[in-house]
Amino acid sequence: MESMFDLVPIWAGIIGFGIIMYVLMDGFDLGQGILFPFARNEQDRDTMMNSVAPVWDGNETWLVLGGAGLLAAFPLVYTVFLPALYLGVFVLLAGLIFRGVAFEFRFKARTSKYLWSWSFSVGSILATFAQGAVVGSYIQGFETENFRYVGGAFDWLTPFTVLTGLGMIAGYALLGSTWLILKTEGALQDWAYRITPRLLVMVVAVFIVISIWTPLMDPMVMSRWFDQLSLIWLLPVGALISMAILVRALIKRQEALPFVATMGIFVFTYLGLAASKLPYIVPPSYTLWDAASAGESQLFLLIGLLFVIPFVLMYTAWTYWVFRGKVKAGMGYH
């Protein structure tokens, strides 16, 4: 029996929401690992890790939610993406696992603490780079035939995907530094204020290059953005306004607004990417409707997910409310 409603846009919205929630929630704690090698001393690294200790594992719930929803609602995505991105996905998962193990052992280690610090950092950087490379692969598209990937194992690794991977590292580091501004005080907060403008410059540089490169690489994106002026141009304008708000907040040494403005940069950039590629979920050929599972399956899974999402949101909100204060040196949550 066919569903009387088209559930594809609903599922696309749910998965899109799960992905951006993961990027925003897990981005700043991956950012701590990226910034780890540049911290002044082990005491600052302890404080950085403690700032995310109560929330880091809960943040990754959104990755599970988005990934499981994608498999259930759009199985063609996995049929194409996994063969195309085996190595990239392996690096992503290995980085997250390695980072999680290092997170737990670093709190307990004594003589080997510095090794777990490096492990935490390397895992964070690898996972972040892999996420950026996967995004870049989505932008540049896949070589498909009869709903199957027919390209090579390393087609995903191109100069463009390397750039998007490095851009994601810079972006998550920016989220991490603004999180430190929000959550810490004293010398560590001052350090975060100093490095944030440099990270913003790197993010802006990558933002400009990708914005120029993408339309040149994809005629459809070129047509969508430049054939006629439309409301789509409000998205990059929103990202630029968020950057300006971030600069002003740093000058005024505000604490909460830099983090909020950085999240705004990510949200507008994410929406710009969606506006550039959708409804093609497997570029350049297959739309959301081509990739969708049967309507009955979507309806059955949607009913279950509508019970799960409110609990995930409540748990996330409760965790951040309970641990909303400043993290001081020597404080431990583990």
Image (tube, grey):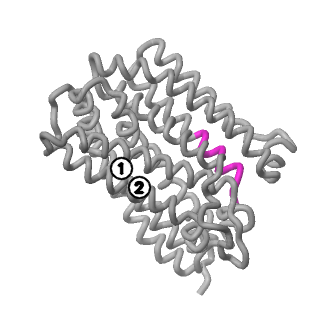
3 vs 162, nearest the viewer: 162
What's the residue at 51%, 58% (across, down)? Answer: 88
Q: Which mark is residue 62?
A: 2
Q: Would residue 193 appear left or right of 159 to someone viewing this image? A: left
Which corner quadrant holds the C terminus?
top left
Instruction: Tell me, yes or no, whether the highlighted magenta stretch contains residue 47.
Output: no
* Main SS, magenta residues: helix
Q: Amino acid at mark 1?
A: Asn
Give the residue drawn at x 37%, y 63%. 308
Q: Residue at x 53, y 35 (%)?
A: 264
Q: Secondary structure at mark 1?
A: helix
Q: How many marks?
A: 2
Q: Residue furthest top?
A: 252
Residue 273, position in %: x, y?
65, 47
Left or right for 105, reference 127: left
In the depicted structure, whether residue 150 falls above or below residue 184: below
Q: Nearer the viewer, residue 259 or 123?
A: 123
Q: Residues within 10 Å of mark 1 (few under 14, many from 20)?
A: many
Q: In this picture, which residue range is highlighted in magenta?
A: 268-279
Badge 1 is on which residue?
Answer: 59
Badge 2 element: helix
Asked if the residue at tag 2 contacts the one at tag 1, i.e. Cβ–Cβ closer than 8 Å, the answer is yes
Q: Nearer the viewer, residue 14 or 124?
A: 124
Mark 2 neighbour density, 10 Å: few (under 14) some (14–19) many (20 or more): many
Vertical arrangement, residue 151 with respect to residue 258, above or below: below
* Residue 194 locus on image (x, y percent): 42, 18
